[in-house]
Amino acid sequence: MIPNEQKVRDFFSRYEALFQNSLGDHPQVDVDAIVASFADYFVESSPVGVHGGPNNEQFHEMIPQGYAFYRQIGTTRMKAGALDITSINDQHVMAKVHWISTFKKQDGSTDTIEFDNVYFLTLASGEPKIFAYVTPDEQAALREHGLIPE
């Protein structure tokens, strides 16, 4: 087992549960726990560019809006599948998470989108915190599956 592997596995199990709890008819968005999953500053990279920002009040306010968007497009389930963890050093890991998302479409049918995100986590504080992540083109996948307009 690599150093901190169990902490990282537990972290993503909680992260998945936080996402799942934010969906459904009676969502419970635990903004504080979600915000606590991120470092004081973090970076996102995707096909639309690289963006970074502080973990501040504005980020805190954006969390419920993000989950509202997922509910609006019909997201009913977000499941973390395979989790590959690579140790970078004693305080940093890279984790590739295979996400499986299930959607209920307007016509009542269901659809699934699977994708991989790569997360970089620091354990400098003793607990994992996301300081960077790399994603595929989420908007393109949602358009391809008819979940958002072209």
Image: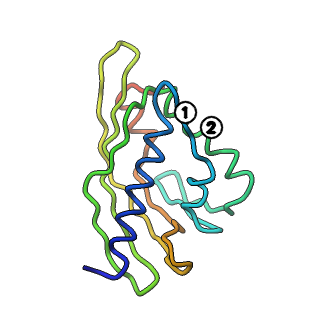
Q: CA distance from mark 2 to mark 1?
A: 6 Å
Q: Is residue 2 left or right of residue 35?
A: left
Q: Residue at x 43, y 41 (%)?
A: 20
The disc label shown at residue 69, or none: 1
Q: Bin the neighbour count of mark 2 within 10 Å (Cα to Cα): few under 14, some 14-19, many 20 and up.
A: few
Instruction: Judge by depth and name the residue closer to the eye, 64 or 26.
Output: 26
Is mark 2 in CB contact (under 8 Å) with mark 1? yes
Query: In x, y percent, where is residue 85?
Result: 31, 70
Q: Secondary structure at mark 2?
A: helix
**In the image, what residue type sits under mark 1?**
Phe
Q: Is residue 119 above or below residue 78?
A: below
> Can residue 95 be seen here?
yes
Q: Is residue 74 above or below residue 80?
A: above
Q: Is residue 102 above or below residue 43?
A: above
Q: Is residue 27 left or right of residue 90?
A: right
The disc label shown at residue 141, or none: none
